[in-house]
Image (cartoon, rainbow, N blue to C red):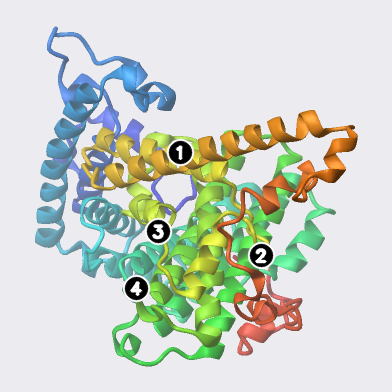
Amino acid sequence: MPSPTPLVPLLSYKDQMTSCGWDFRSHAPQKRILTLCILAAASLVSVEPSYVGYDPSGDRFSAAHLKWDAVSSAPLGSLQMSELGARRKLLSARLHGEAVRQAHQDGITSFASIENATSCFLLNTLDVTYTPNSTHPWAAAAVWQLRTLSELGVIEAVCQLPDISSRDTSCLQWRGFLSLLAVYAMNAGKSLPFSTYDELLICGPSPASLDQMFSQAEHIPPHVAVVQLVRSFTAHGIRLMRDICETLLAVPVRDCPLDDLHVLRLVTAAEHLHAELARYRRFTRRFGDGPGLRLCLHSISLPCCAVAVALYNTLFSRAAGAGGLIGQLRVRARALAVRAVVDTTADVRDVVVTHWLGLNQAGGFEAWARVLVEDVGQTDFECQAAALDDGSLGGYQVSTEERIEALVRLREMIQFSAFIGIERLDAIPAIDAKLERLRARMEERASEMLYHSDILEPAKGTAEASSLPFDIPSPDLWDASTTMDWMPQQGAFDMGALHDTSIDVSHWEEWLYPDVRSDTACAGGS
């Protein structure tokens, strides 16, 4: 990690601890508590004997437990992985509890420092890892710390470093910190623990729009372009999550009727963000597929997917069976959520440091699985959503094969949570049942294809074919006419309104957020 980061540089901090023999009792309260927080987080992923002891034969646990392909495969043995996870969870809980006790005792929440801000952030992360519906008290404390440090000029000093690479990376991590807090809050149906003023104070002015950043990216070094694009994505993602939380999920508006126009704006914004994310994937593929690029992609695809799933879940619960524009928006939200889950599971599956995934998804994998597993109902709109799931309509084509691959990946990731002691396996039976149905559907379609090809082959090129008492469609049409006979007719409802191309979203930020200044002259700040 670069030295000037929101999280204290681990290597230099490790050197400090090694020099004192890891006797952190001699340190000042803020360093002592941060040490406990770091140890509590590290204990969830380490196989060092000092953390988890030795295996039954008295040997160290295999280093294979840190490799995704080995640890997530059945031959490794889930029993041993669960045993290690249980040990980690117990040890982490003890370190976490001691850190909380000392944090309250020494009152770190009333004294602003980089170390205390980091401690509060780690304590919040440990809270939501095992309790996703936490009230996030440590998140609020961390934001207060950062706000105070910003007002004292500490963060500004970091963001004015002469080393451009370190400065950009550090400033990006401030937004990443707030973005992760926003994902936690939205997944739990709570308001964001920081205000727009906090964001401005901590991160600086908003970066340029995505369209502007993509235009500039062609003329600047690739590593700079990637960082600037991630900054822009993160800023727009936070803004959209704030709107969803404040206008759809917040307690005062939960029982209010949905505003059709506002929901339209949110769904359109989420669709546009998803399209820009696909553009980012294409852009970064030109530079390879290294760990850093994977991590950057993960940091922006996670909030985008969380937004899509939150929109769909909200409309599913608050607009069940609704018709008109809201019903059509619900269909679009489901189609977007399915496509986002399929894409993001592929991103997550390849991300670097996979054993940390349980610490930053806060129950999201189960919510993603429900999007792919749930069978839609029998209303016209829900039947239409079923067609959208399989790519029959709209721009979010998801084949049965893609759905199966995504469910398999999600199953692996949910099982992998046992690696850090999280036993959220309730979704596994539903995933297995859905996989069985999807595979049966594929086999049935393959049998139909084979049957019809057997009929067509003898008739091909013969005069008898023209005298058959029925019309055999062209083989090229089998996918549409034979295997898709379950799809509702397009005349079932107004398809024109479903994807209204008359709405100009070329300047979506100004249209959706008229209060945002178009002037980005000061966008160079983070």
Few, some or many C-alpha atoms within 10 Å of disc 4 (few <14, some 14-19, many ≥20)?
many
Q: Which of marks 1 and 4 is nearer the N terminus?
A: 4
**Disc nearer the start of the sequence (2/3):** 3
The percent position of residue 506, horizontal first and vertical second, equals 76, 76
Q: State how far apart marks 2 and 3 are (Cα).
A: 19 Å
Q: In the structure shown, which secondary structural element does the residue marked by tag 1 occupy?
A: helix
Residue at mark 1: 440
Residue for point 42% across, 84% down: 247
> Are the residues at dot 1 and dot 2 in contact (C-beta closer than 8 Å)?
no
First of labels 3, 1 by sequence position: 3
- Judging by the rendered image, the residue that carries numbered circle 2 is 394
Whether the residues at callouts 3 and 1 have beta carbons within 8 Å, the answer is no
User: Nearer the viewer's eye, disc 3 or disc 1?
Assistant: 1
Q: What residue type is labelled 2?
A: Gly
Counting residues from the start of the chain, the first of labels 4 and 2 encountered is 4
Q: Distance between the residues labelled 3 and 4?
A: 34 Å
Q: Earlier in the sequence, mark 3 or mark 4?
A: 4
Label 3, label 1: how many angstroms apart (C-alpha)? 16 Å
Hey, what amino acid is under mark 3? Asp
Residue 184 placed where, x, y %?
35, 62
Which-is-in-front pick, marks 2 and 3? Answer: 3
The residue at 25%/64% (across/down) is 138
